[in-house]
Amino acid sequence: MIPIPYRKVLLIDDDPVQIAILSAYFSALRVPHILTAENSLRALDLLAESDGDIDLIVSDLQMPQMDGLEFLRHLKGRQFTGRLAIMSGVKSDILEHAGRLAKLQGLNLIGKLGKPVSKAGLDRLFLADPLESGTGKDAQPGDRQRLQHGAISRESLLQAISEGRIVPYFQPKIDTKTRTIYGAEALARWLDREGNVIHTPDRFIPVAEQSGLIVTLTESLLAKGLEAIVGFRRLNPALHFAFNLTPSMMRNLKLPDRICAMLRQAGLPANSVGFEITEDAALDPDARTLEVLSRLRIHDFELAIDDFGTGHANIANLRNFPYTELKIDSSFVLSATRDSFSLQTIKSAVGLARELGMSVVAEGVEDHATWDLVRGFGIERVQGFLFGRAMDAGRFAAFIEQCRTGVKTAA
Ligand code: C2E
Ligand code: CA
Ligand code: CA
């Protein structure tokens, strides 16, 4: 039996029967504190009264007074960092949109539940082995994960950075034409002192952003990443690597020089490295942002717009900024074979990229049907669990070696 990671849960539904079912479910799991609210306003009161120690909210979408979508916005405003599950009897595509909205708000959404809820559905969402469920989505056999819950403080993050325990993992990118490895994206992982992964980036990157540690964290990741990349390129000199930068960093005029100096020190050419920047409203087309992006581009770094399609889709930004690559958000790719809206979004993103001379990457390719579909669209590169999850430097080096005899899929 997996220990239940929740100590205080908040259940919100205007239907007393649903509340009773969920309360019974969580008390059977011996969750010590179960709070219930019949509407969003009451839920916000309970949230305000708690000491920030609610670690799971399960919310209905359709409620009187304030609907679930508006409630999500309030949760974001209250900087709720616990987990969230949404549940509703609405049509599944509306539930999909609500899920995207939650993700866009930076909320830690662990899943969506259609009504009526079943015990099996609840177990899948709340009891799955962390190695299989959303929070452990990058875990793979051999990974030592001990994911922790609860709030992350600035102090603990700073300590982890200074002890070198925020490290890059590498997820392979595959070239669809040659079917060989193209390179990798560096994804941050927080390790404990024994080397187990204890936090995934969706938990600590927002803390870094809010507490002024994002530059320190990114520079430390870059330093470690570049060192590893020197080794990877000894095995295969053609590989390309990408790091994630947040929109707020794009206003830092010193950034391009700092990055160039780090590459020079590592002895790596600029065209071996690129940066992915999340599509975000904060990326105002102002002169400063444009200067930072353009200088990175002049130095020959590839620039990708990340998570394309998740809401702030700003075509003007695409035209105004010197992006070279468009990354289609995994939420569309994951559902492309069964959801026509996702399929249309991919189609129009590819059309737009072609018109602007950008290459396209699809992330979230988990099965062969999706792989065939994205290749059919002429998408240049893919990332996804079908080929490999993010892995530590040692395992990524082994992956490069295996690719000498052709890329193997995990399925
Ligand atoms: P992202 O940049 O969109 O990164 C891709 C995420 O999708 C990764 O999650 C990856 O593990 C996951 N993914 C890849 N293939 C599949 C697939 O086939 N199926 C599914 N279900 N998921 C897949 P991860 O590593 O948890 O990263 C989450 C986000 O955290 C990243 O999203 C990125 O926005 C942010 N992040 C990660 N590392 C850094 C960093 O060093 N700096 C900054 N600023 N943000 C980072
Ligand atoms: Ca990315
Ligand atoms: Ca993404």
Image: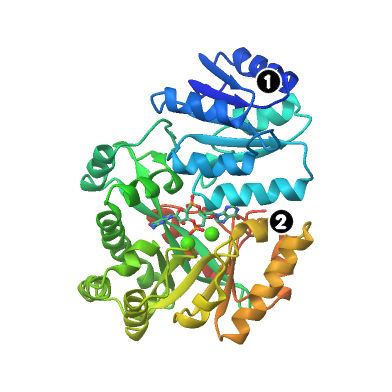
Residue 296 location, quadrant: bottom left
Whether residue 245 appears in this view of the structure is no
Task: Residue 335: give its label.
Answer: 2
Q: Secondary structure beneath disc 1? A: helix
Disc on the earlier residue, 2 or 1: 1
Q: Position of residue 361 (x, y in %)?
A: 57, 70
- The amino acid on which the numbered mark 1 sits, given as a three-letter code, is Ile
Side (left or right) of 284 relative to 33: left
Tag 2: Cα neighbours inside 10 Å, few (<14), some, or many (≥20)?
Answer: some
| Residue at 29% in and 47% down | 211
Residue holding disc 1:
19
Q: Secondary structure beneath disc 2? A: loop
Which sits in the foreground, 410 or 221? 221
Whether residue 373 appears in this view of the structure is yes
- The amino acid on which the numbered mark 2 sits, given as a three-letter code, is Ser
Tag 1: Cα neighbours inside 10 Å, few (<14), some, or many (≥20)?
Answer: some
Side (left or right) of 16 relative to 255: right
Q: Position of residue 353 (x, y in %)?
A: 60, 80
Q: Position of residue 406 (x, y in %)?
A: 59, 69
Side (left or right) of 371 relative to 272: right
